[in-house]
Image (cartoon, helix red, strand yellow):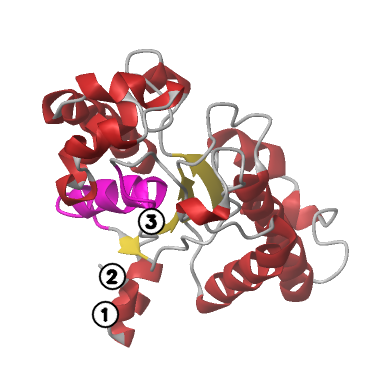
Amino acid sequence: MRYELMLPHQIRAAIAAQTPVILPLGVLEYHGEHMAVGMDTLAVTRIFDRLEQEVDLVLLPPFPFGAASLAVAGPQSGTVHVDADRFQPFAEALFTGLLRTGFRNIHAVVHHQTENFAAGMPTDLAFRFAARQALFRFLEAERGEGWWGDNDMADYYAQHDNGTDPFNWISVHPLMDARITASYPFDHAGIGETSLMMALAPEAVDAARLDDNTTWYTETARDASAELGETGVQLILDRWRALLA
């Protein structure tokens, strides 16, 4: 369900059912001459477009204005970079708003720069920190100071072990985990991402443009195919079916 199209009674039902809420995160970044600048955002939104057909989800409008960085190409390429400290307050306010509405099963999903997700990159780190800040402030406002030390929280570590403690109300994830990238190429505008777009958003790829400005990171894109992309799509869908089950 698209959140902006939901009626109030549907929102109440989704909250009562603990329906997963998905926030797609992305950037607008140069991906060679052959691919749309919204690739990182489209990878997330198009995956959940598919998953929505089989799993109950609440899909929030995507946030595509992350910290793209200018490491790949300058702004004249179409990259739109926003410093993370500019949107972190927005992220905290957004998460706080979702918590106040009643959602407790929120998942922000990012594809940009996630090859070292454990260490983090500006976009995901900003949203991860914002999620923690929102949770701490919301819990203190709702339960009062000292809420964690109260005897009512004596089972906190048991909640933590089974994933039901309050700090799991908001999670930030990479679209693809290490298991997927071990069997599907993870790259920037190369065979992996180009194939993924051919499968998910073919209108975002023009292979004839590959000769316009070939760079080291796009060289393998010549071997991209929708068939390979579909292999990646199925791996990603399998992961998210299990994660949201």
Label pair 1/2, CB-CB below 8 angstroms:
yes
Q: Which residue is mark 2?
A: 2
Query: Among all residues in the image, which is located at the extreme left?
Result: 227
Badge 1 crowding class, 10 Å Cα cut-off, few under 14, some 14 to 19, many 20 or more, is few
Q: Nearer the viewer, residue 96 or 129?
A: 129
Labels 1, 3: front one: 1
Q: Quadrant of residue 195?
A: top left
Q: 112 above or below 26?
A: above
Question: The residue under label 1 is which amino acid type?
Answer: Leu
Q: Tell me where residue 79 appears, x and y as whole percent.
A: 50, 53
Q: Tell me where residue 76 appears, x and y as whole percent.
A: 51, 55
Viewport quadrant of the C terminus = top left
Range of residues picked out in magenta = 35-56
Q: 242 above or below 155?
A: above
Question: The residue under label 3 is which amino acid type?
Answer: Pro
Q: Nearer the viewer, residue 158 or 115?
A: 115
Q: Secondary structure at mark 2?
A: loop
Q: Tell me where residue 16 appears, x and y as whole percent.
A: 38, 69
Q: Tell me where residue 171 appears, x and y as whole percent.
A: 55, 48
Q: Which residue is mark 1?
A: 5
